[in-house]
Image (cartoon, coloured by chain):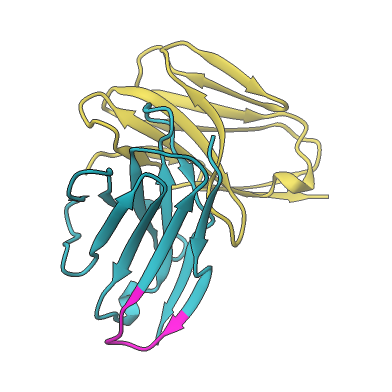
Amino acid sequence: SAVISQKPSRDICQRGTSLTIQCQVDSQVTMMFWYRQQPGQSLTLIATANQGSEATYESGFVIDKFPISRPNLTFSTLTVSNMSPEDSSIYLCSVAPTGWETQYFGPGTRLLVL
Amino acid sequence: GQQLNQSPQSMFIQEGEDVSMNCTSSSIFNTWLWYKQEPGEGPVLLIALYKAGELTSNGRLTAQFGITRKDSFLNISASIPSDVGIYFCAGQLEKAGNMLTFGGGTRLMVKP
């Protein structure tokens, strides 16, 4: 497994602003993922952020809205840009340390956009 | 997107009862994972299944990878109040690389 931390744990933001969420892992991992969990819903994959390559976005998510950085094997950031109330969600990072499909999740960042 | 049907959506049971939930799909999966999410937390991996027919236990939890590779179930025996949370199944589709598809979740409530 892996120990994953996220910052901030929660935030309240004004519409039109941007927020950058950090994900830190206690070991080197190639595969890292960003998910969104809207209130009362399941998890939806935003993008895959593997170190050494550009992030791959899922349908409905674009780089201009959710730019991702992956500068090394233990760290990634997700920015939620030009926020609107519809972006109010929990944002979660996950890692797959063994290279299998087994993913471990961080505690999440709870975002409220007013 | 791919459909992964999880049922029931919610359960309200008495402490000590056994619980069963399942996920089904029309597609074939290579991996099944079961997670538990408590309020204010991220999902925590409970059990991972990698082979059709595999039956794995983790304490009072037992999960199986369906023989058809299109379903999985999770059983909780002798439920206790701390079992409360949302349980998610997740599967890795045969042709979807490392992407996980999540079920809609089963909200479990346990009455002491």
Task: Pinpoint residue A11: horizontal percent, then vertical percent.
Answer: 48, 78
Which segment did they paint magenta?
A: A12-19
Q: Residue furthest right?
A: B112
Q: Residue B5 in magenta?
A: no
Q: Quadrant of the N terminus of chain B?
A: top left
Residue drawn at point x = 44 percent, y = 37 percent = A103
Task: Pinpoint residue A72: horizontal percent, then vertical percent.
Answer: 34, 49
Q: Residue A16 in magenta?
A: yes
Task: Pinpoint residue A42: horizontal percent, then vertical percent.
Answer: 42, 52
The total number of labels drawn is: 0
Where on the picture, by quarter, is residue A39?
bottom left
Where on the picture, by quarter, is residue B50?
top left
Residue drawn at point x = 35 percent, y = 61 percent = A77
Q: Is residue A57 visible?
A: no
Residue drawn at point x = 58 percent, y = 56 percent = B41
Task: Pinpoint residue B14: horizontal percent, then vertical percent.
Answer: 77, 44
Q: Main secondary structure of the magenta part?
A: loop
Front one among A15 and B53: A15
Q: Residue furthest front?
A: A72
Query: Which chain is displayed in yellow in the rendered image?
Result: B
Q: Is residue B75 visible?
A: yes
Answer with left or right where residue B83 lies relative to residue B48: right
Compared to residue B75, the image places residue B65 above or below, namely above
Front one among B112 and A53: A53
Residue drawn at point x = 46 percent, y = 25 percent = B72
Compared to residue A9, the image places residue B37 above or below, namely above
Query: Which chain is displayed in cyan in the rendered image?
Result: A
